Image: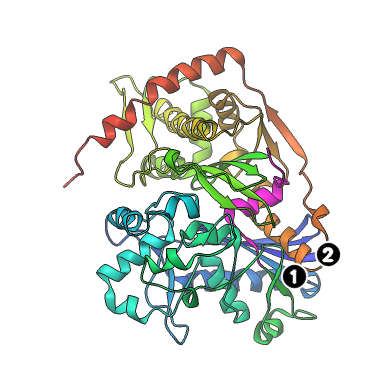
Amino acid sequence: MICLGIDLGTSALKAALLDDDEPIAVAIRPLTVQRPQADWSEQDPEDWWSAFVACLDELRSREPAALSETRAIGLAGQMHGATLLGARGDVLRPCILWNDGRSQAQCAELESRWPALRAVTGNPAMAGFTAPKLLWVRQHEPTIFARTARVLLPKAWLRWRLTGEAIEEMSDASGTLWLDVGARRWSADALAACGMSVEQMPRLVEGNAVAGQVGGEWVRRWGFARSPLVAGGAGDNAAGAVALGAVHAGDAFVSLGTSGVLWATTARFRPNPDHAVHAFCHALPETWHQMGVVLSAAASLAWWARVTGTDEATLLAEAEATPPSSPCWFAPYLSGERTPHNDTAVRAGFTGIDAGTGRADMTRAVFEGVGYALRDAKDSLAAAGTLLAGADLIGGGARSALWGQTLADILDLPLHQVAHSDIGCALGAARLARMAAGEGQAVVGKPERLRSFEPRAAEAARQAARHAQWRALYPALAALPPPR
């Protein structure tokens, strides 16, 4: 079955045309983030639509026959973004993104207003989530708040433009702090704590359910033989899990995208908010998951490449030629941190630098620092009762053998590079589309493992000791006053 998987990320929109799991063609368009003030992170939703249209136009020019036979479209997307619409569907302001930190004060206010928040949503209030953003808008942009008729997450807004339907699915809705995650429905109490109502929310479906059809204008533009249905889809990490076949309790993966994620599938709702572990719905019915989240994973290496004026491949090649541990340290808190600290104010830093420190040493410190932050996440999952035996690797950073082996040693876990990891979220979205079009859950198989990284006993012990030292960086950085 030919389906489209759409991955609306932070740095790019990716459209993958697939025949079952085999890619026919992939189109990508970059996206940029606007940071008009400190701690702010925004995008114009029209840029998402322009990127989507450009990708579909490219696929039609390259593979018109295959595109015409598309049966269904699945949507995966960056989570938590607050896209505010007026009564006529007009976008009222730029979307406030997942890595925006302006609403930290509103998090405390939200938990005070609604003491049941952690028990019902399974998560502490974090500035990255959607609900505190709306409290911020209510307080700082009251005219816009008063005009807000509907709030959509990024991929739900893309669906609305494509189908005219305001629909969201469970995995993405879990990241709003408005969902009763155990019951898989909107919580009227959660919304009331933000001065909002269920009527302002999209209709909820499961990720493998039908959630609209492509409108006639777009059917004609892209030459579809019949109007493709659109599946509920998934938040980006849940889509990656579907691509990896991580749909059974105990399945796990590490995502090295812009952010970093340590994921564990669970058979029931298992919250542990006190350790800043996310407990969300999966994209498939009657399935949940836990996540530890590092806000700057591959983003840390991308930042370092930009600062040094060197491409990432060169930096990693230089690091590979250095001794197996950096003499300096890096804390990857470029946008604050979630698991386990839930601190939007803390910032990144190097330490241990002397006159002999070179660029390669600092590069190794960057990806080791991301690894240590993920080790924090692993320890938080363990405190929540989730012990991992191994994990797959996805995301842009997963292509690096050096990073993969270093992570295996730091996490003391076998890690596996898998086929099609470069289109993981789009593949997961396409699989959900196939299920919505009538295929069963058997489409959610495990991908081919291309390479495995086993933890080396001596290195794992050494990295455990280094991680214990590295953990002193957070309290030291958190104690620093903000720059003026």
- Compared with 97, 288 (above or below) is above
Q: Residue at x 76, y 69 (%)?
A: 63
Res. 326 in view? no
- Compared with 79, 482 (above or below) is above
Magenta residues (range): 232-250
- Compared with 384, 78 (above or below) is below
Res. 208 in view? yes
Q: Position of residue 188 (x, y in %)?
A: 47, 68
Q: Residue at x 43, y 31 (%)?
A: 369
Q: Please, what is the three-letter code of the amino acid marked with disc 1?
A: Ala
Question: Where the N terminus falls, by quadrant?
Answer: bottom right
The local secondary structure at tag 1 comes to strand
Q: Position of residue 133 (x, y in %)?
A: 36, 62
Q: Residue at x 34, y 22 (%)?
A: 357
Q: CA distance from mark 2 to mark 1?
A: 9 Å
Q: Earlier in the sequence, mark 2 or mark 1?
A: 2
The tag on residue 1 is: 2
Q: Is residue 235 magenta?
A: yes
The answer to whether mark 2 and mark 1 are in CB contact below 8 A is: yes
Q: Relative to 405, is 431 on the left or the right? A: right
Give the labeled residue for mark 1. 72
Closer to the camera, 26 or 375? 375
The local secondary structure at tag 2 comes to loop
Q: Please, what is the three-letter code of the amino acid marked with disc 2?
A: Met
Q: Position of residue 386 (x, y in %)?
A: 59, 34
Closer to the camera, 149 or 179? 179
Q: Is residue 180 magenta?
A: no
